[in-house]
Image (cartoon, rainbow, N blue to C red):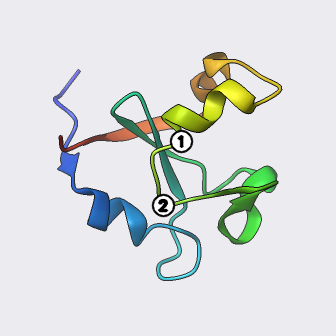
Amino acid sequence: MPELPQYTKSQLALRNGQDKPEIWVAYNGIIYDVTESRLWRKGQHYEHWAGQDLTPELADAPHTHEVFVRFKAIGKLKP
């Protein structure tokens, strides 16, 4: 498997469903494309917004990190 490209937080922020057509979120340093998810329409999923690192917010979610296996990992978040 090839190495995933790295993106900055600023680049991730542009994929929020508003500025560009892609809808991306990050979890534990990996960026996932959630564009096709009906739950992320217009870049919002309940009180969560796309284009950011959702790692600290997962503790309050009704699901575990396993939810990310449904989505394609498309990059890594630059430290």
Q: Is residue 44 above or below residue 2?
A: below
> Marks 2/1: CA distance?
9 Å
Crowding near the residue tagged with mark 1, few <14, some 14–19, many ≥20 C-alpha atoms within 10 Å: some
Q: What residue is shown at x 76% (from left), y 31% (from top)?
A: 61
Residue 14 falls left or right of residue 49: left
- Secondary structure state at the residue bearing disc 1: loop
Name the mark on residue 35. Answer: none
- Residue at mark 1: 54
Q: What residue is shown at x 48% (from left), y 60% (from top)?
A: 51
Q: What residue is shown at x 40% (from left), y 66% (from top)?
A: 13
Q: Position of residue 18 (x, y in %)?
A: 57, 80
Q: Where is residue 29 in the image (x, y as percent from the top left)?
A: 33, 33
- Residue at mark 2: 51
Q: Position of residue 19 (x, y in %)?
A: 48, 82
Residue 46 falls left or right of residue 11: right
Total marks drawn?
A: 2
Q: What residue type is labelled 1?
A: Leu
Q: In this view, does 46 lie above or below 79?
A: below
Quadrant location of the C terminus in the rendered image: top left
